Each structure stands twice: as structure tokens, then as C-alpha cells.
Amino acid sequence: MASKLGGKLDFYKGWLSNPKGVGAIAPSSPAMARKMAEATRVGCDKKVLEVGPGTGVFTGAILARGVHPDNLIAIEYNKSFLPGLEQRFPDVTFIHGDALDIEIIAREQSIEKFDTIISGLPLLNFPSAKRVQFVESMLDHLEPGRPLIQFSYGLSPPVPVSSNHFVAQHLGSVFGNLPPARIWAYKRV
């Protein structure tokens, strides 16, 4: 209970300091976190990347799904979330940085490709060109055929498929989230 309350307090502190960067009016629900984490492969020994872990709702779901903490790396831009994340998940590697620096981060972590990438970023808050850049750079760092999982509060994917470089598949909707969300899987063609 204290951990849940601490996570909500961290969320609202982060929201007050940077509402557009946090991008939601409430923390993601456990139902949404479980749906996002479904894309990870149980028992896989490859690295999983979480982008924008915030208060750790998705982090907890990814670990509950069976990803070993040593195989989870998370990049968080908002420094105020890091102490709470590191306290709740001491065996996960948390990196303060920008996800668009994935090339440098992957090299520093000695990772060639990730098995799955779970993004908690509010992509619709970014300009269209930056969203495309984000998806392209994440897909460049995934094993062939493996997904970038992204949510959206809109009806269409946050990065529309306008090229033959990748596809977006709708994985489902989560109505038990505030606001309701749609889950998308981006993959290279």
C-alpha cells in the first residue's frame, strides 16, 4: 500500500514539474501495464528496454510477466522519478537520459539488440517528426520481428504508418485506464 501511494505521489510531483512530459492525468492502471507487458517473452534471456518508466507501473508488470530484473533496462528522462524507481526495483538498470540517445545507451550497455521495447512515453505530445524518429530509432535496436509496444489515448496509432519501413498492429484497448488507452505494436516489415 505504501509503495502504491508513494508511486502516485511521485507521479503527481512529476506531473506538477512537467505536465507535458508526463503526458497523463493519472498514473497508468495495472490493467494497462499488464496489457503492455504481454508482448515480453516469458523466460527469454535477452534484454528488454522500457522507455519512460515514470513511477514503475509498467516496470512492475514487466517483472511480474517473468522478465528477470537483470534483463530489464529502463531509460527515464525525468530525474525526479529515478529515486523511487531505484528504491522499488534495485536490480533493474535505470538510466537517466533521452530515449533518442538509444545508440549511445545501447553501446554503453554492450547491447546490440533488444528483444522487446515497452514505451511509456506520451508520444502524442511530441511533434510528428520526433515521433517518427523515435519509432524508427527504437525499431533499429530490436531483434528481427520483435515489437516496440506503445500506447495512445487516441483512436489511431501515435505514429501513423506512412512508409513501407514498419507496420502498426492494434493489440487491444484498455478501458480500465484513465483515460482509456489503445495499445499498439510497431514492427519492421
Image: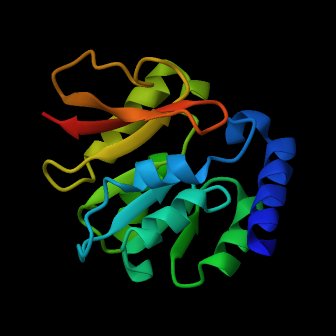
Question: Where residue 176 sits: x, y (%)?
Answer: 59, 39
User: Is residue 133 visible to us here?
Assistant: yes
Residue at image coords 81%, 66%: 6
Residue at the image point whose x is 69% and y is 39% from the top = 21
Closer to us: 186 or 5: 5
Number of callouts: 0
Q: Is residue 100 above or below residue 87?
A: above
* Quarter of the rendering occupied by the N terminus: bottom right
Q: How is the image coloured?
A: rainbow
Q: Is residue 114 left or right of residue 128?
A: left
Q: In which quadrant is the C terminus drawn?
A: top left
The residue furthest front is 176
Q: Nearer the viewer, residue 74 or 56?
A: 56
Residue under the point 27% across and 53% down = 141
**Is residue 18 rendered to the left or right of residue 24?**
right
Comparing 75 with 27, the one in front is 27
Instruction: Say which quarter of the image contains residue 133.
Output: top left
Residue 77, image x, y percentages: 63, 53
- Give residue 142's position: percent from left, percent from top: 24, 53
Query: Toward the viewer: 6 or 143?
Result: 6
Q: Is residue 73 above or below residue 162?
A: below
Q: Position of residue 183 (x, y in %)?
A: 41, 36
Residue ID at (44%, 79%): 69
Res. 52 in view = no
**Residue 17, quarter of picture:** top right
